[in-house]
Amino acid sequence: MQARYLIDGTAHDVVATRGGDGSVQLRRGQRSLRISREALPDGRWRVTVDGRSRTVHLAAGADAVFVHADGLGAVQVERQTLSHATGGAAGGASNLLSAPMPGVVIAVHVAAGEQVRAGQALMVIESMKLETTLTSPRDARVKTVHHAAGASFALKAALITLEDA
């Protein structure tokens, strides 16, 4: 199965094949990775990539998963359909940053009209007792900040809208 994943705003096109043991083989260009996961009794997951394991927290929403690893912070992974991935804003990045799960806005680092760079921190949210920093997927201008610090939001709620700079 061919798919596109946005990992912290960077697109990765991969071919995924499920193994008989439940593992997944991901191929991106010439590189191939074998990935498996195991649920742990304390609610965390053990994720193994090519034989190297790391224990992580997963916070899943309808369209994205936040992977929280001790010492590494959070990484947002969003799966896109290829038809959706090829359209939209510059480089296929979306103009809308939406909530991957319900939560509360902890901090807002930008305002409407402000120019932002790819990777710049825009907002900090908290969900399931885990803080996540939302970053800009590309160079852009902030069109709208939909929620102020302290505001609660629902799954898939619009958090920040970007526009071409």
Image: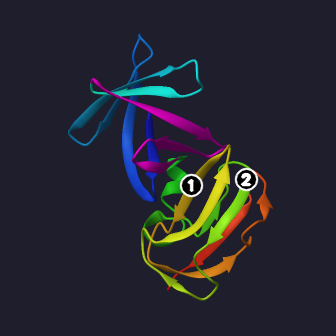
Residue kind at label 2, given as amino acid type: Gly
Assign the N terminus to one quadrant of the image. Answer: top left
Going by the picture, which residue comes out furthest to the top?
20
Q: Which residues are magenta?
A: 51-77
Residue placed most toward the observer, 142 or 55: 55
Disc assigned to residue 132: 1
| Residue 45 located left or right of residue 102 | left
Residue placed most toward the observer, 93 or 113: 113
Q: Mark 2 — residue?
A: 103
Q: Element type at marker 1?
A: strand
Of the numbered discs 1 and 2, the one sitting upstream in the chain is 2
Please rate how many residues cluster around mark 2, counting C-alpha atoms within 10 Å: few if below 14, some from 14 to 19, many from 20: many
Is 106 above or below relative to 81?
below
The x and y percentages for residue 152 are 79, 59
Residue ID at (71%, 64%): 158
| Residue 26 located left or right of residue 41 | left
Residue ID at (49%, 79%): 140
Residue kind at label 1, given as amino acid type: Thr
Residue placed most toward the observer, 2 or 52: 52
